[in-house]
Amino acid sequence: MSKGYTIGRIILTVLMSFFIAGYIFVSSADSILSLPKVYTDIIQDEKLADKAYDAIESDFKKQYNTTAIPAEVYMEAIDSQWLEKEMCKRTEIYLDYIDGKEADYLTDYSTLEKSITDFFNEYAESINYKPDDAFDKKLDETITNAKSTIENRMDAFYMNTLKSNGYLDKIQKYKPVLNVLNWTLYGLFMILIIVFILIERHRSWRRLYWSGTGFFCGGALALIPCIYVLCTNAINSFAVKELITFTAITNLLESGLQRIFTKSVFFIILGIIIIVLNVVFCNKKQPVISDKQTDEK
């Protein structure tokens, strides 16, 4: 086996390893930005709606000191099921927005608006106050503040905040590039597999060795950062400690890490299987030629 033979195949194997590692990372990121189920599963499994409900109730109780409006006025108009539905729907809308799909969706606050309006009217009637422009202005401000309070707590993944600051527009701009890069990396390592098969076409099972090595190294290359993150517990060091956001973001990061980990292990196992097959079949004993057969020749 010549030196050039080995060096050439090592270079192709290294390239294949980086293409596979890149594909693992990019495909995992692409799925996180494309699959609403990733987010809705977190919302449901971690009971984020219940946490949001408790936080909203706490917010309105604190506001009572300045608004004199009991928290029950707001809380009787919403429940955990409604919050969960809204949180899941909003996530789908934002992911559609990242994919370049505009959707006209307005949250139904009619029950909340009615509850606040009834409270204002009942209070005005109890003190014989005739509603005027100032009354209407205060009512509108209270309804707007109530909606803002609820929406802030429903924004578990900071999607609305990112959109308001223009970051979702930037993600939307580069999302098609991510898709192209994903398929490009996939295509490149598949091409290298074909190249290995062609240049090793006369070597029987030996043609699988370099492809298997590429699979193994590519998977290992992607797995190393996962192991580092797990060992350092980096995800739980997320700066924002507010319960709802911390739970949502850390679970989202863990979901992305799990996808990378799973794909990395898959390629490692696939590489090991291919290498073992190569070793087993290449090391099979060749049939022994007897003396009689030698004489006949």
Image: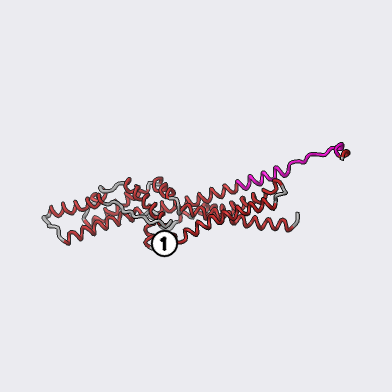
Residue, disc 1: 169
Looking at the picture, how far across and down is residue 129, in whole percent?
12, 57
Residue displayed at 39% across by 46% down: 44
As drawn, the residue found furthest toward the left would be: 128
Q: Nearer the viewer, residue 176 or 21?
A: 176
Within 10 Å of the Cα at label 1, are there few (<14), some (14-19), or many (20+) other Cα atoms? Answer: some
Q: Quadrant of residue 99?
A: bottom left
Count of numbered tags: 1
Local SS, label 1: helix
The verdict on residue 283 being magenta is yes
Taking the image as shown, residue 67 lies to the left or right of residue 192, namely left
Coloration of the structure image:
secondary structure
Which kind of residue does numbered mark 1 sit on?
Asp
The rendered magenta stretch, by its main secondary structure, is classed as helix
Span colored in magenta: 270-293
As drawn, the residue found furthest toward the right would be: 295
